[in-house]
Every structure is written in C-alpha cells, then in structure tokens.
Amino acid sequence: MYCPVCLNNTLSLKDHGVLKIEINTKHRDNNIFLYDLKKESELDLHVNLQNKVDDFLRWYSSFQNKEPIKSFTIFSQDFSCSGGCSLPVNLNLSVIGILFQEDDIYEILAEGCAKYGLELDNDVEMITS
Ligand SMILES: [Zn+2]
C-alpha cells in the first residue's frame, strides 16, 4: 500500500491494533475490536467480525425507519511505513482486501440481515482503500 507521506509502496498494517466498523455510515462506540495477527487465525478474525456485525444489525433492527444495508467499511489506524514516516494521526484506512475479503463480508452481512429481517442492498458498497 502507498504511504500518504513518502508516496512509496511501503505502508502495511501492523501485527496488532484496533478495527472499527461502519455500516450505512453509522458507527457505535462498541463497534471496535482488537486484532492480533500473531495470536489469531483467519477463522478467529472471521468469527470476531461476525459477532460485531451481528451485534450492530441487532441494534439497527430496532430502528423505526430501517434502510436497506447499503454500505460497509472496516478500517484501522494501525498502519506503519517501513520508511519510518510518521503518519497523520487521523489516518483511517480500510482493511477490506487486507484482513477481510469482500465475499466473506457479503456472506456475513447476508446472514445477519436474514436473521434480523433487514434488507441487504444488492449493490452494497464495500469501502476499500
Ligand atoms: Zn512513508
């Protein structure tokens, strides 16, 4: 990935850090979870994401006016540049395509929407970096 400071292809996600989810551009304080690539398998990450999405959709399903689920993103600030750049503190980049693949996310959203009676837009937008 490209570093926003030196513009070289030297940016990578750290081994551990914090992930945040936004669905339909909404987020809740507890939409945050930790990851640790040294301790967690791909399956662990998948299950954690599933739990967080489930939690969000259960909350969202209690809304009066429920819009179809149209957009999803999961992002992190925990990137580093191997060139040693100090990165902007507000740098938030999507980890779709890095930690999670679109197909897997789609599946998780589809399951959650079916469970809570929500509509998943056919063209749900996955925000990637
Ligand atoms: Zn850099």
Image (cartoon, rainbow, N blue to C red):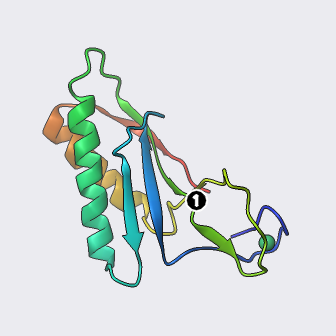
Q: In this figure, which residue is indicated by the disc labeled 1?
A: 77
- Which quadrant of the rendered structure holds the C terminus? bottom right
Q: Residue at x 54, y 48 (%)?
A: 127
Q: Residue at x 66, y 54 (%)?
A: 91
Please tell me whether residue 113 is drawn above or below residue 13 in the rendered image: above
Ligand 1 visible in quadrant: bottom right
Q: Nearer the viewer, residue 64 or 77?
A: 77
Q: Quadrant of residue 84?
A: bottom right
Please tell me whether residue 40 is drawn above or below residue 71 in the rendered image: below
Q: Residue at x 66, y 73 (%)?
A: 80
Q: Nearer the viewer, residue 29 or 22?
A: 29
Farthest residue, direction bottom: 38
Q: Quadrant of residue 70?
A: top left
Q: Residue at x 45, y 58 (%)?
A: 19
Farthest residue, direction right: 6
Which amino acid does the dot numbered 1 rest on? Gln
The number of callouts visible is 1
- Which quadrant of the rendered structure holds the N terminus? bottom right
31 horizontally vs 63: left or right? right
Q: Position of residue 28 (x, y in %)?
A: 38, 38
Q: Position of residue 56 (x, y in %)?
A: 28, 40
The 10 Å Cα crowd at callout 1, few under 14, some 14 to 19, many 20 or more, is: many
Q: Quadrant of residue 14?
A: bottom right
Q: Position of residue 50 (x, y in %)?
A: 26, 56
Q: Position of residue 123 (x, y in %)?
A: 45, 39
Report helix, strand or loop for mark 1: loop
Please tell me whether residue 33 is drawn above or below residue 45 in the rendered image: above
Farthest residue, direction left: 115
Is ligand 1 less than 8 Å from the beta carbon at label 1?
no
